[in-house]
Amino acid sequence: MEDGTVERIRPRDRILETARDMFHKHGIKGVGVDAITEAAGTNKMTLYRHFESKDDLVIECLRATACKAGAMWDAFEAEYPGDKLAQLHAWVRKAADMLNADSRGCDMANAAIELSETDHPARRVIKELKEAQRDRLVNLCREAGVGQAELLADTLSLLLEGARVSLQSVGAEGPSAQFVRMAEGLITSFRGAAAR
Amino acid sequence: MEDGTVERIRPRDRILETARDMFHKHGIKGVGVDAITEAAGTNKMTLYRHFESKDDLVIECLRATACKAGAMWDAFEAEYPGDKLAQLHAWVRKAADMLNADSRGCDMANAAIELSETDHPARRVIKELKEAQRDRLVNLCREAGVGQAELLADTLSLLLEGARVSLQSVGAEGPSAQFVRMAEGLITSFRGAAAR
DNA sequence: CTAGGGTGTTACCGGTCTGTAACTTCCAGA
DNA sequence: TCTGGAAGTTACAGACCGGTAACACCCTAG
């Protein structure tokens, strides 16, 4: 029966999921491999059989996170097929939801800040993944018929990035509380400029 | 002659300045007290005679940074006395200059991300100092005669915060390159709304 | 049943971290 | 010149870090 319904989770995947969660909550330098393996119900040797080093594990975690974020975009297309403007508004709503639900911000941005050495192997990956996300948002803006799609996408990117970090430094009552209003105002403004 | 022109810098101040620089460049968890004292040309015992702990040193560094930032605002008032709108534009220019000159972003935001424990003693200080900065920007916007001063100030805050972190994750060619255009566009837009 | 790969366990290495103790040296002010 | 406090020096404690070696186990495919 080649497995059946039990479907035991492989140690590698348990480690990856646990590490993602712990890196997200406590930061990369704030979590040791011992703590990860213990929380994942395994041990250090098994971790090092599946990952070359802690840095390698970090990179795999970032890729997994980006992959999940990619699925989010597909969900927008599935919910509003072809309606790019609705998808853009859905993006704003989703971003706001994430701000309300979680106060630890973006794993990739946090990692870039924590791993300050510019030649750290994770930095390449972070840049690649962030650029891919930017491209998706630019395309969404362009296909939504917004004038100056790149500028709107970049503005929304910075707003969200700023909201995520502001949430951590001044809390939920700070400027990040106005994110939706700002984003919607910008979209309206850019659409007006395109229609004019 | 009570000292004369030599004016030797006290060990405490040397430690504070060195720590500020090293925390900024390498992060808080990325630098140890040994490295700080060595770079400051002193030793660990002297550090612990002036600061209760590393956390205490971190807090003092953040206060010093905020103090220097406060002097920046005074410089705006000195350069454009009474002309609040000119001061707001000067703020935008200054922010852009800092983005170009330094890619490590805001010490307080970085610290908030690195010190993920919400009850960390530095978090209170970070929140206080960030709120003070927000208040100054809100006042500047209001006195510049902008409608919805709070919303403009918060938007500009998030934009700058986002630009600083984007600079670290995707580099200078990313969205942060458009910061001035975004900020100036926002100011124009909000001024138009007020005049209407 | 058996062989073998994935897994778990224990112990260890060398290094770094924050923080402290005990002592010496230096230097400015009276 | 004397003295007291600030600063430097050395050594150490205790904990944690990333990473590895050697070995026992278990479970599944053949």
Image (spheres, coloured by chain):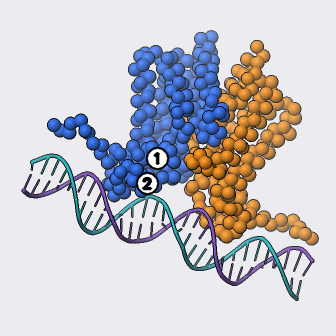
Chain colours: A blue, B orange, C purple, D cyan
Q: Position of residue A184 (x, y in %)?
A: 60, 21
User: Where B147 falls versus B67 (above or below)?
Assistant: above
Question: Count of labels shown?
Answer: 2
Residue indicated by mark 1: A22
Q: Nearer the viewer, residue B187 or A39?
A: A39
Quadrant of the rendered image containing residue A168? top right
Does B31 sit above or below residue A105? Answer: below
Q: Position of residue D5 (x, y in %)?
A: 80, 73
Measuring from the top left, give residue D13's x and y in whole percent: 54, 73
Residue A55 drawn at (x, y percent) = 44, 52
Question: Which amino acid is tagged 2?
Answer: Ala
Residue at x-position 56% and y-position 56%:
B30
Residue B154 badge = none
- Seen in the image, is A104 located left or right of residue C28? left
- Circle 2 Cα neighbour tier, 10 Å, few/some/many (<14 / 14–19 / ≥20): some
Q: Which residue is painted at 60% across and 31% down in the image? A: A159
Name the subunit of mark 2: A
Please name the residue that numbered disc 2 is placed on: A35
Mark 1–mark 2 Cα distance, whole angstroms, equals 9 Å
- Judging depth in this view, the residue of A172 and A114 nearest the camera is A172
Q: Would you say C7 lies left or right of B8 here?
A: left
Mark 1 in CB contact with mark 2 (< 8 angstroms): yes
Q: Can see residue A149?
A: yes
